């Protein structure tokens, strides 16, 4: 198998008179991300698709959302075709979306499941989770995008109901269980690489968002868009368990109690994916430190993973 060429920002020599912003972001270590993830993320972000296509797609997609909102007033209240939606999403991902974007999308299901499992196992009132771990793009046909949102809300409800029922609050445990954390084992090389697989992650999400609105009920679409605001909630849970609140600065998807318009759901989905990657990378650092009997350096000093 031939070696995949480096992204342009890594292949080119540095020029002091014309420094690459992507190289600066790749070299920066202020945010926790594995190098392979950061490389894929920045290769996708610096692509021609995102630079030239996204500015045209975004207003068109948002116009469609507004028009569909009006149109669906005349639809039956329970109008939903999740099977058709997921079939279209899988078809689009396999034929038009870049390998980096597809890889990051599949990783997201695995990492999100592991983060929820970390919280559920370390809560003083343990809560079971329903992991979503697709092995390939075709596995997404099983309504995984919809299940992802349902899992998140159901987890928050079950966790807090269990804590309330037992009169407990989330706190750092005496011993952190980090055994659920691992690399998903998905390979970028296995992603589709046809001639038309050029669409970047954010452009793909902007295009897919109107499909969500058209083929799901209003409740499902609203829940999908506003699940993004639970990023702060999940971040607070993890920061509490780790006793490392300074890492909340990495999570910025708006206040969970203030619902936002669905028009910006595409951009916020990208932020959601990046927040999950960084949170998982942080937890992996704590796992490695726990195994080595060391402390993780944080902005407020060393933090241990007992």
Image (cartoon, grey):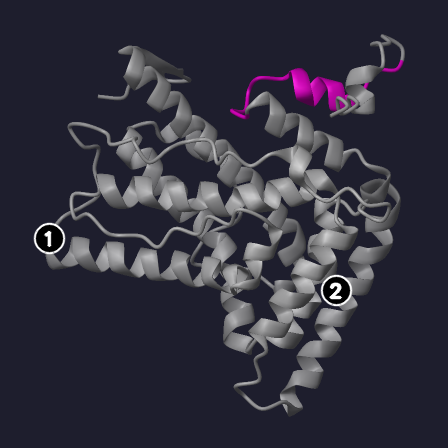
Which of the 4 quarters of the picture holds residue 15? top right
Residue under the point 80% across and 21% down:
9
Q: Nearer the viewer, residue 175 or 17?
A: 175
**Range covered by the magenta-colored residues:** 18-33
Residue 36 position by quadrant: top right
Residue 23 part of the magenta-drawn span: yes
Of all residues shown, which one is farthest toward the left? 166
- Towards the viewer: 219 or 138: 138
Sequence-wise first label, 2 or 1: 2
Q: Secondary structure at mark 2?
A: helix
Q: Is residue 24 above or below residue 199?
A: above
Q: In the image, 283: left or right of 258?
A: left
Question: Is residue 302 visible to us here?
Answer: no
Question: Is residue 289 on the magenta stretch?
Answer: no
Q: Is residue 32 visible?
A: yes
The residue tagged 2 is 62
- Kindly report the distance in space between the C-alpha atoms of the residues bearing marks 2 and 1: 44 Å
Residue 2 is left or right of residue 191, and the answer is: right
């Amino acid at each position: 198998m031939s070696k995949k060429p480096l992204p342009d920002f890594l292949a080119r020599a540095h020029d002091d008179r014309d420094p690459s912003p992507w190289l600066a972001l790749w070299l920066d270590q202020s945010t926790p991300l594995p190098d392979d993830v950061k490389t894929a993320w920045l290769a996708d972000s610096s692509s021609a698709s995102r630079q030239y296509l996204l500015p045209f797609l975004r207003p068109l997609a948002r116009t469609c959302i507004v028009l569909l909102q009006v149109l669906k007033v005349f639809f039956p209240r329970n109008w939903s075709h999740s099977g058709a939606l997921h079939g279209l999403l899988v078809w689009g991902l396999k034929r038009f979306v870049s390998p980096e974007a597809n890889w990051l999308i599949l990783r997201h299901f695995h990492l999100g499941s592991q983060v929820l499992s970390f919280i559920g196992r370390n809560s003083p009132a343990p809560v079971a989770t329903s992991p979503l771990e697709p092995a390939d793009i075709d596995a997404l046909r099983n309504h995984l995008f919809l299940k992802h949102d349902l899992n998140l809300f159901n987890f928050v409800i079950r966790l807090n109901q269990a804590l309330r029922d037992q009169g407990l609050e989330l706190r750092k445990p005496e011993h952190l269980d980090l055994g659920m954390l691992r690399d998903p084992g998905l390979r970028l090389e296995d992603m589709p690489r046809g001639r038309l697989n050029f669409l970047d992650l954010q452009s793909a999400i902007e295009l897919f968002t109107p499909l969500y609105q058209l083929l799901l009920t209003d409740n499902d679409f609203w829940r999908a868009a506003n699940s993004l605001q639970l990023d702060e909630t999940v971040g607070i849970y993890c920061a509490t368990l780790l006793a490392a609140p300074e890492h909340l600065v990495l999570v910025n998807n708006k206040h969970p109690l203030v619902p936002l318009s669905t028009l910006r759901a595409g951009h916020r989905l990208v932020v959601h994916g990046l927040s999950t990657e960084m949170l998982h990378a942080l937890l992996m650092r704590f796992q490695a430190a726990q195994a080595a009997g060391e402390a993780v350096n944080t902005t407020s000093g060393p933090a241990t993973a007992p």
